[in-house]
Amino acid sequence: MTTAALGTSFAARTWWFRPEPVARVAVLRTLVYLYVPLDLFVRTATVVPHSYGSPDLYKPVDVLALLNQPAPVPWFAQTLRIVIITTSLLAAAGLWPRMLGVVVAIAYADWTCLAMSYGKVDHDHLAILVAVAVLPTIGDVSWRSPGRSEAAGWALRCIEIAVVATYFLAACAKIRFGGWHWADGAIFAWAIVRRGTDLARPMLHHPLILLLSQWGLLLLEASTPALLFVRQRWRTLGVVVLLSFHLMTWLMITIDFAPLVVCLLAFLPLERVAVVAARTSRHWRA
């Protein structure tokens, strides 16, 4: 192996396994596992109702087709939901993080795939599925865990890449399937006409703003890989911009990206939340 190749390999390992604060992963793990039960009733709630319907409507996504998993029946859907809620809440509390984390990862992935086997596949679930898959590798950590570790860095990097891939590939899909007409057309106007709120409808009278917003969104999504390499202050600014976009999307056309938003927090110094929580706890005890 050449010196250049060795240098590239070392740099890649250093980047993938750069030690990160253990408390950051602990806080993120709590947030992810607390969100998962909510997702069962908000974003993927159709699994149980569909289990009472005709199995002819079931068109399994590729992974379920590969496993030859049949359409869900009521007892299976209800049991799967109970398992996910119970294990995710216990894992959020820090109990048996490896064992319960594996159960959550498998059960929630199955639930999500079932939800998306009756229609469109929501791309905003990619990052959270990666998150529940890698969080069990961290083991027994808490908000008060000191120091940094390579295991924490690897888990965070996997989640961050999944978040960035969601945005960047969304930009690629826009151009692949819609061409540059996506940015030059009236896609935002169509969305507002179709499902716009009272806040959004006045924007129909300002087509230039909508056009510029389309280009802005496309450029924003395409530039998200920079979040993986910039300093923390720029990462924080990028997260604020993306959170603002999601807030406006929800306020104007009632589309939320909650699973993605939760994982987007991986780019923030969440360990500071743990410090504040510890100080508050000591203050109240005093």
Image (spheres, helix red, strand yellow):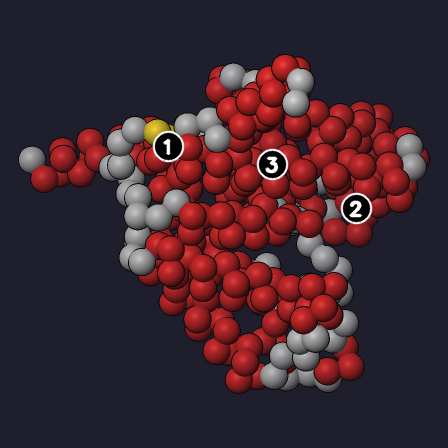
Q: Position of residue 12 (x, y in %)?
A: 58, 26
Viewer-nearest of discs 2 and 3? 3
Q: Position of residue 65 (x, y in %)?
A: 73, 70
Residue behind mark 3: 161
At label 3, the amino acid type is: Ile
At label 2, the amino acid type is: Ala
Residue occupying image coordinates x 64% and y 35%: 164
Up-down relation of residue 7 to residue 179 (above or below): above
Q: Position of residue 58 (x, y in %)?
A: 74, 75
* Quarter holding residue 152: top left
Residue behind mark 1: 149
Residue occupying image coordinates x 69% and y 83%: 53
Viewer-nearest of discs 3 and 1? 1
Q: Earlier in the sequence, mark 2 or mark 3?
A: 3
Label 2: state its secondary structure. Answer: helix
Closer to us: 196 or 120: 120
**Could you tell me if the residues under marks 1 and 2 are in contact, i.e. CB atoms within 8 Å?**
no
Residue behind mark 2: 191
Closer to us: 137 or 231: 137
At label 1, the amino acid type is: Ser
Residue occupying image coordinates x 13% and y 33%: 283
Q: Earlier in the sequence, mark 1 or mark 2?
A: 1
